[in-house]
Amino acid sequence: MRRPGSKQRRIVIMLLALLTFGIAYYGGNRHTEDESLKISGVLLRPAMPVPEFELEDQHGNSFSKQQLEDHWSLILLDPNRSSDSPALVRLVQIHNRLAIQPAIQQKIRFVYVPRQPATLTLAAGLGAGFFSLSGDAVDLHEAFSRFGVSDTEDGFTLYLIDPDARIRVLFTGGQDTATIASDLITLISNHRS
C-alpha cells in the first residue's frame, strides 16, 4: 500500500480544519439569541444582570430588581436635575409609538427614575404601565451609580430589561423614538424564552 503524498496530506489536513471550524462555528452560534436582529440600540451579548437597587414606586410600594422579573421593562434613569427634563416626554413618546402593536406595548413596563422629585408627579398619572420611582438622596445616588450614571451626566440612557431581569439593550437619548419603538417590537417579537 502506498503512503499518501505531501499534497494529499495537506488537503486532508485542510479539510479536517475546515470541518472542525464549521462544527465549532455552528455549535457556538446555534444557541445565540437575537444574532440576526438588526437594531439601532446596543444589544448586550451576553445580557447583564440588573444591579441590585431599592426604591419606591409612585404608590409608596417597594420597587427593586425583583419587580423587573417575568416581564419586559424600559427603564429611564434621568440624571437631569431640572424639572423640565425632556426624558419623561421621550419615554411617553416611545410608549405612544408602540400603540400600533398593543400586544407588545402591554408587555412592557415603563419605569422613570428622576433625580428631581418634582418630575415624579408628572409620571405618576400616565397609566398602569408607567412606574415612577423615588427614594432618598442616598438610595437614588446608589441606584444611579449601580446603573453607571454619573452625577455630572446630563444625557440619559434607556435600559431594556428582559423577563429574566437582565439588561438586554441600551438606547441613548439621541436615538429617535420611532426607531426605539421599532427595535422594541423586533426584540420582543423575536425573543425566545
Image (cartoon, rainbow, N blue to C red):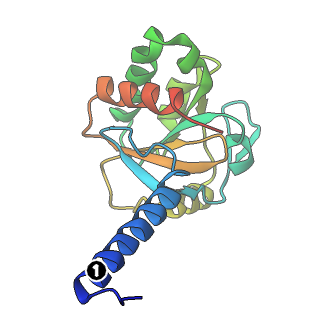
Judged left or right of residue 67, residue 142 is left
Question: For the residue carrying disc 1, how many other residues have a C-alpha within 10 Å: few (<14), some (14-19), or many (20+)?
Answer: few
Residue at x 72% of width, y 37% of height = 70
Q: Is residue 140 above or below residue 15?
A: above
On screen, residue 67 versus residue 180, left or right, reads right
Q: How many marks?
A: 1
Q: Position of residue 73 (x, y in %)?
A: 57, 36
Q: Is residue 80 visible?
A: no
Query: Residue 193: percent from the left, percent from the top?
Result: 66, 39
Disc 1: which residue? 8
Q: Position of residue 133 (x, y in %)?
A: 60, 40
Q: Nearer the viewer, residue 29 or 66?
A: 29
User: Residue 87, relative to residue 98: is it above or below?
Assistant: below
Q: From where the camera sits, is residue 190 visible? A: yes
Q: Is residue 163 left or right of residue 21?
A: right
Residue 33 percent location from the top left of the image: 51, 46
SS type, badge 1: helix
